[in-house]
Structures are given as C-alpha cells and as structure tokens.
Amino acid sequence: MCHPLPCTSQEYYKKFLYEAFPVESHLHHYLHDNLNAEVVSGIIENKQDAVDYLTWTFLYRRLTQNPNYYNLQGVTQRHLSDHLSELVENTLSDLEASKCVAIEDDMDLSSLNLGMIAAYYYTNYTTIERFSSSLTSKTKMKGLLEILTHASEYSQLPIRPGEEEVLRRLINHQRFSFENPKCTDPHVKANALLQAHFARQHLGGNLALDQREVIISASRLLQAMVDVISSSGWLSLAILAMEVSQMVTQGMWERDSMLLQLPHFTKELAKRCQENPGKSIETVFDLFEMEDDERRELLQMSDKQLLDIADFCNRFPNIDLTHEVQKSDNMRAGGEITLQVTLERDLEGRIDVVTVNAPRYPKAKEEGWWLVVGDTKTNSLLAIKRVSFLRRTKVKLEFAAPSEAGEKNYILYFMCDSYLGCDQEYEFTVDVKDAAGPDEDSGSE
C-alpha cells in the first residue's frame, strides 16, 4: 500500500520540479588565464581595470546571492570590494611570479613574452611557465615528451577504475621508459598514450577517446613550446619540437620509414621498398618518380589502393623555395640582416591541398610551416616565422648581424608541422661590414 508523502517532502520535491537550480560561477578558479588574456589584449591596463572587469561578470552577480559558496564574510559593498581586490591581487601576483605579466609601480600592468604565448595558444599559464623553467638547450626527445605531457591541460585526464593494470602494461611497452611511474598520474597516462600513438599500438574503448584528446592538445601545446624555445634562442631543440609536431600528426616515430605516412603501407612493405633492386625507395618523392609499371609491381596493390597512394603523393608538399639576402647599409656588425624568402607550389587546380592527409590524426588539420634562420656552430636560433600559404607567398626574416665583421654562414630551415620528409635546408653566407663610424654616419669622408 502506498502512503502519501508528508507535506514537507512534497514541497521539497516541488522545488526541484518547478524552480531552476542555481548555477554558480567558476571564474575564480580560472581567473589567471582570463586576466592574462585581457592584459595581453590591452583591455586591462592596471589593477583597478581588473577589479572593474570583474564587476561585469556573472561571478560578481552571484557573490551577493550565495556568499558562502565564494567564502565571503558579508555582502556589504565593503566586503565585495575587499574580496575582489584580494582576488585580483593574488591572481596578478601569481602571473607576475610566472613571468607572464609585469607590474609597475604596484599598479600598472603590461604583458610579457610568456603571457603573450599563453594567450595566443589558449594554454594554461602554468603550462607555459613549466615549459620555460623545464626546457634546456640540451633537452632530448625523452625529456621533451615528459615536459610536454606534464602540461596542466592533461591534469584532468581521467583515471578510471580498473585502468591501472592496463596502463601498467601499456607503459612497459613504450620506447622511452618511465622512472617509478604512477599509473594513477594523468600525466604519466598522457605520456603513455602519446608514445602508443607514435608506435601505432591499437587502443580501444575509453583509452582511444582519451588518446584522441591527448593528440589534439599536443599539436597546440607543441606550437606554444616552439615559441618558448625560440625565445631562448635554442636552434636544435626548436627543430626537435617541430619534428615531434610532425610525429603527432602522422602517428609515427621520427626514426620510422617516411613511407609509413602513405595509406596501406606496412613496415614490411616499407622495408621491401627500401630493398628495391636498382634504386632504394625511401621517400615519398622516390615513390612518386617511379614509372607506373615499376610502382605497381613493387607495391602489389589493388587499383583502388594505388589511387589512394597517388592521391597522397599529389597532396604531399612539393614546394619551391628561393631566398636572397637583401643588400642594405645596415648590414654591418651590430646591425640587421634581412632575408627575403619566396615560397611557391603548383596545385594543379586543387584548392584543398593544404588539408593534411593524416588518417591517424583525430580531426581535419591544415598545413603549417616554420621558417627558421639558425647558426649551427653556436646552436643559436636567430629568426623564426610561422607561415601558412596556398600557392605563393613572400616572407621577410630579419635578424641581428654578428658583432664582428666578416663572412658568416647561416642555415635557413623550412619545416612542416604535419609531414615528415618534406623539410628543406639551405646554407647561405653573409658578408658583414665593419660598423659605421661617426664620419660614415654623418655622410662625410
């Protein structure tokens, strides 16, 4: 027999049926990145601007409605003002300690390089701080992957009940070992999933979904990492980070055969191509240049598979690069050097070629490129520019001339963020004159 609910219970459940649940703001938990972005954009120029900014948010509206939730001691104007001032003060102090924001005269705010990188790539300010403090000029592949996967963006990666043993087995089968790995650490899991992606190990269920998120975040984080490295002027590490970006997109290690980027290719087939009598086939360009009959005999694929191969080869970047050092009176010791770079390719009527052919990447991705000028003798990165283009573009790279006159050798790198095997290198020499003296500056002899 059913008994009617007491009146008090009826009223309680009616409240859930007929009244909306209160929605609280979580802005105070993510305020660092919001304020950093507003400082970078110039919306917030001082601490008072930051307090005024908060008064226009949903957080401000909820403070008086549910003060206990936000740890307010009262709801008077004085309490609100003190709470917002303290919130802004603590947040900006953290950003200053992280070298994202500079505070002048204890009031005025200005953005620093790390803050600009964090805002541009929508990354957590603590991630950029970690990149800056952990990377060194001698960091290798293993260390780079550890630093990358310790990004704050991976801290919320779920560790589900029963996953620990699966993760332990996954960790034990990766290229780079883990020192005292904690299978309950989301950063360790992110590292294992990323290495499994490079090794093309099959994952199913929730692990595959987690791996998808790890991969997508990794591309953006690596772009931010390249900017952090470039700020320190480390050439070899910047090139390494760019190569890791290629690995993430294609799902393979840098030591694997470049032919594994092609559809339907296996390690066995790549090895057969490499051992091809007459001419070893090691790159996409080698395969593209073969006669049709020879290629068909070597690959032993169906017509449909061969069409897929042909489509990939047609989309693979084949870019003509020319460069020229611009002559100028400023090309003297301590002056400035300008390098003009022209990039061009024939798309043969196609306009979608900038979409990367990467079936192992979870979503559509467009080609991106870096132009880099470096000095290999000193491992110095002198200039870098991110490039995206369709058919033709011209780019100027400006960098400081050496402090001493004479001939100086540099390397121009053209690096892709999505394909392996299409990068280009060019050596060029600059004849730097002596610094102009007072007589030369004034135009007298």
Image (cartoon, rainbow, N blue to C red):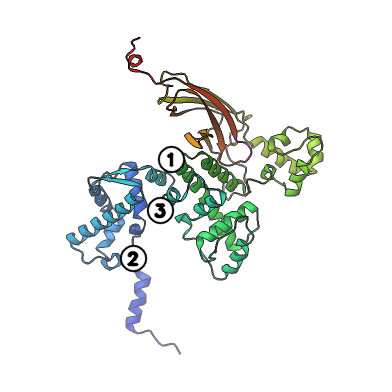
Quadrant housing residue 328: top left
How far apart marks 2 and 1 lie (CA) works out to: 45 Å
For image coordinates 34% across by 63% down, the residue present is 24
Nearer-the-camera pick, 244 or 9:
244
Q: Which mark is residue 57?
A: none
Secondary structure beneath dot 3 equals helix
Amino acid marked by disc 2: Pro
Name above or below for residue 184 compared with residue 34: below
Residue at image position (48%, 56%) is 150
- Judged by depth in the image, the label closer to the viewer, 2 or 3, is 3
Q: Which region of the structure is painted magenta?
A: 417-423
Residue carrying label 1? 231
Q: Can residue 40 be seen at all in this image of the molecule?
A: yes
Disc 2 from disc 3: Cα separation: 31 Å
Residue 126 bears which disc, if any?
3
Disc 2 versus disc 1: nearer the observer: 1
User: Relative to 35, is 317 on the left or the right?
Assistant: right
**Of pointers 2 and 1, the one earlier in the residue sequence:** 2
Identify which amino acid the numbered label 3 is placed on.
Thr
Does residue 374 lie above or below 187 as drawn?
Answer: above
Number of the label disc, if any, that sits on residue 22: 2
